[in-house]
Amino acid sequence: MRTNTDPFQALADPGRRAILMLLSQDKQSINTIAGNFDISRPAVSKHVKVLYEAGLILIKDSGRERYCELNPAGFDEVKKWLEFFDQFWKNKLQNLENLLNQQHKTK
């Protein structure tokens, strides 16, 4: 169940970002994820829990294993934030280009 963990807080940790990169290849069990890191399985489980509570991943039980996979909808808030600043900088650069073109025309 997802709580209100801030996705930006979840993304702030390099280990959690590495877990997300692993999951971008395919869904994986928590044990498989843990095998990619030099930290304990309980530590990996805590990272997975933070990612889950932030809505960035889904966890599905299959027999005795728990599989993690990316939750595309979980990245919507981050995507909107990045799109805002992407547009912001595009506008600033367009304004600069317009100003330079005006100055070039007046010479």
Image (tube, grey):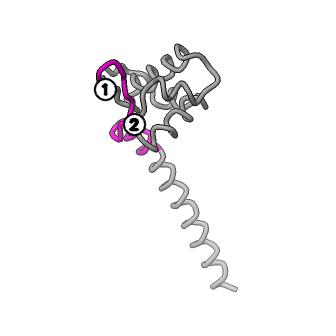
* Residue placed furthest toward the right: 107
Q: Is residue 71 magenta?
A: yes
In the rendered image, residue 83, in percent from the top left (x then y), is placed at 45, 50
The secondary element bearing badge 1 is classed as: strand
Question: Which residue type does callout 1 highlight?
Answer: Lys
- Quadrant position of the C terminus in the picture: bottom right
In the rendered image, residue 62, in percent from the top left (x then y), is placed at 29, 25
Residue 97 position (above or below residue 71): below
Q: Residue at x 50, y 27 (%)?
A: 10
Question: Which residue type does callout 2 highlight?
Answer: Lys
Residue assigned mark 1: 60
- Quadrant position of the N terminus in the picture: top left
C-alpha gap between disc 1 and disc 2:
10 Å
Residue range corresponding to the magenta coloring: 62-81
Residue assigned mark 2: 27
Taking depth in this image into account, of 68 and 105 the one nearest to the observer is: 68
